[in-house]
Amino acid sequence: MRESALWAKGCRYVAGVDEVGRGPLAGPVVAAAVIFTPEQTPIEDLRDSKAMTARQRDRVAGVIRETALSWGVGAATPREIDRLNILKATALAMRRALALLSTRPDHVLVDGRPFPELRTEHEAVVKGDATCQSIAAASVLAKQARDGLMTLLSSRFPEFGWDQNMGYGTAEHMAAIDAVGLTPHHRRSFNPVSQLKLF
């Protein structure tokens, strides 16, 4: 794990950061930050949140919240995404998550590529959710939070099937947009074409 090497160098408070929800047509982008101590016992079944079932994520998320030294979850709204663009909005969600940490990190690990929009010194780790316990934990907390929100919103806007598609542009979702129109939770700057151009 990347954290072990950093702990050995004296970086005691290593924060892992990850996000979910950059691609959907509706809902916020959500990020989480997690700090474990060197004494942290590895969490069973903790891995990339996308490879876990909802039940596994719920169980593991509870363990993370109970055992992590500090954790925070931040989001950027669809309106902020439209105003800033998705990269800047993602960075905003990450900054909000980091700001909620009760302990200031010595080092920040971010999943994927370098993220200059974050405006915080950090180390980018390719496939970080497979090699960094804190990034994997952040992935789980962010996905659990966002999926829970989209499920709640689905009860208010059942036509869109957000409890199943989580705001992504499925056929069901697109048909509902055609039939019902947009909600306040849709990203006006997104459509299937511009979405593909962004990623």
Image (cartoon, rainbow, N blue to C red):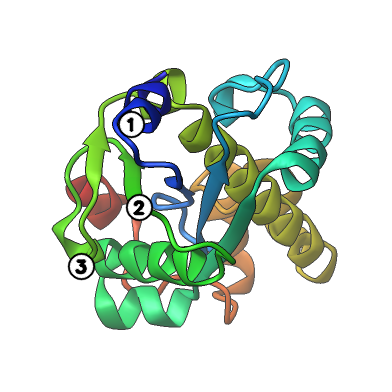
> Label 3 to label 1, Cα distance in Å?
21 Å
Across and down, in percent, residue 115 comes to 20, 52
Crowding at mark 2 (Cα within 10 Å: few <14, some 14-19, many 20+): some
The residue that appears at 52% across and 68% down in the rendered structure is 75
Q: Position of residue 91 (x, y in %)?
A: 32, 64
Say whether disc 1 or disc 2 marks the residue closer to the N-terminus. 1
Q: Quadrant of the N terminus?
A: top left
Q: Residue at x 48, y 72 (%)?
A: 99
Numbered tag placed on residue 106 in the rendering: 2
Count neighbours of disc 1 (C-alpha within 10 A) and say few if under 14, some if 14 to 19, many if 20 or more: some
Which quadrant would the C terminus be assigned to in this image? top left
9 sits to left or right of 36: left
**Which of the two residues, 76 or 8, is positioned nearer the viewer here?**
8
Residue 134, above or below 44: below
Instruction: Confirm whether residue 190 shows in the render.
Output: no
SS for dot 1: helix
User: Residue 172 location, x and y as percent?
Assistant: 62, 46
Q: Secondary structure at mark 3?
A: loop
Q: Nearer the viewer, residue 141 or 152?
A: 141
- Residue 115 vs 76, above or below: the answer is above
Q: CA distance from mark 3 to mark 2?
A: 15 Å
Question: Residue 10 appears in which quarter of the rendering?
Answer: top left
Residue 76 visible in the picture:
yes
- Closest to the observer: 153 or 57? 57
